[in-house]
């Protein structure tokens, strides 16, 4: 039987922005990996695009200040890249994940190149100095993982164990 996990994306103040169903692929002691389909209108990030029905393999962690989405083309299933959200550590329940998004994002392309996104939105947030430092440390850590192809950035993208 397939286990459904509902992902609840929250803003930095803990208010729900959206919720969507996914399928549990794997669960560790402090993380999980789910799969879902992008069910919203296409989103363009310069020359990179997430389209309706793209397949998303998503990692959430209770002890890390980020989550990672491997984005696969909805038609060819080719890896398009990884979209990383800087967040407070996720709250992982038996059937729900709650992740507080801190606006700062990292796009990692299959060739390993990275783009930091939404820095202005992150700067505008009223965060404690500790939360801001944790978020920036998470961004730095994600860049290092991506550069070394570890964790969710290992190819193939469905690698299960986090680094």
Image: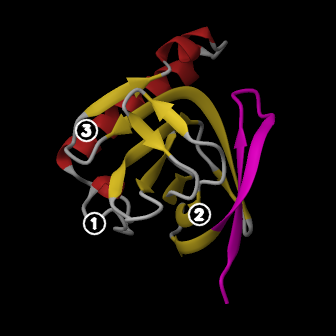
Q: Earlier in the sequence, mark 3 or mark 1?
A: 3
To which residue does mark 2 refer? Answer: 36
Q: Earlier in the sequence, mark 2 or mark 3?
A: 2
Q: Residues within 10 Å of mark 3 (few under 14, many from 20)?
A: few
**Does residue 43 show up magenta in the picture?**
no
To which residue does mark 3 refer? Answer: 144
Q: For this rendering, which residue is in front, 26 or 75? A: 75
The answer for how far apart the CA atoms under marks 2 and 1 are is: 17 Å
Vertical placement of 38 versus 86: above or below?
below
The answer for how far apart the CA atoms under marks 3 and 1 are is: 18 Å
To which residue does mark 1 refer? Answer: 156
Kindly tell me whether residue 163 is visible in this rendering: no
Front tag of 3 and 1: 1
| The residue stretch that appears in magenta | 1-22
Q: Where is residue 104 shown, x and y percent of the image?
A: 51, 26
Vertical placement of 116 versus 30: above or below?
above
**Does residue 14 show up magenta in the picture?**
yes
Helix, strand or loop at label 3? It is helix
Q: Residue at x 59, y 61 (%)?
A: 37
Q: Quadrant of residue 161?
A: bottom left
Q: Residue at x 64, y 43 (%)?
A: 41
Q: Are marks 2 and 3 in contact (CB under 8 Å)?
A: no
Q: Where is residue 58 shown, x and y percent of the image?
A: 51, 57
Q: Is residue 72 left or right of residue 120?
A: left
């Amino acid at each position: 039987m397939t286990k459904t996990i509902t992902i609840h994306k929250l803003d930095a103040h803990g208010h729900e922005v959206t919720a969507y169903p996914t399928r549990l692929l794997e669960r560790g002691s402090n993380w999980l990996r789910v799969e879902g389909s992008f069910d919203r209108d296409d989103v363009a990030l310069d020359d990179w695009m997430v389209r309706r029905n793209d397949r998303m393999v998503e990692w959430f962690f209770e002890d890390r200040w980020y989550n990672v989405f491997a984005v696969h083309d909805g038609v060819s299933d080719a890896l398009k890249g990884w979209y990383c959200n800087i967040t407070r550590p996720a709250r992982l329940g038996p059937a729900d994940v709650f992740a507080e998004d801190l606006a700062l994002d990292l796009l990692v392309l299959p060739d390993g190149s990275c783009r930091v996104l939404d820095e202005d939105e992150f700067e505008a947030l009223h965060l404690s100095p500790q939360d801001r430092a944790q978020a920036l440390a998470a961004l730095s850590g994600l860049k290092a993982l991506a550069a070394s192809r570890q964790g969710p950035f290992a190819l193939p993208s469905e690698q299960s164990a986090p680094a």
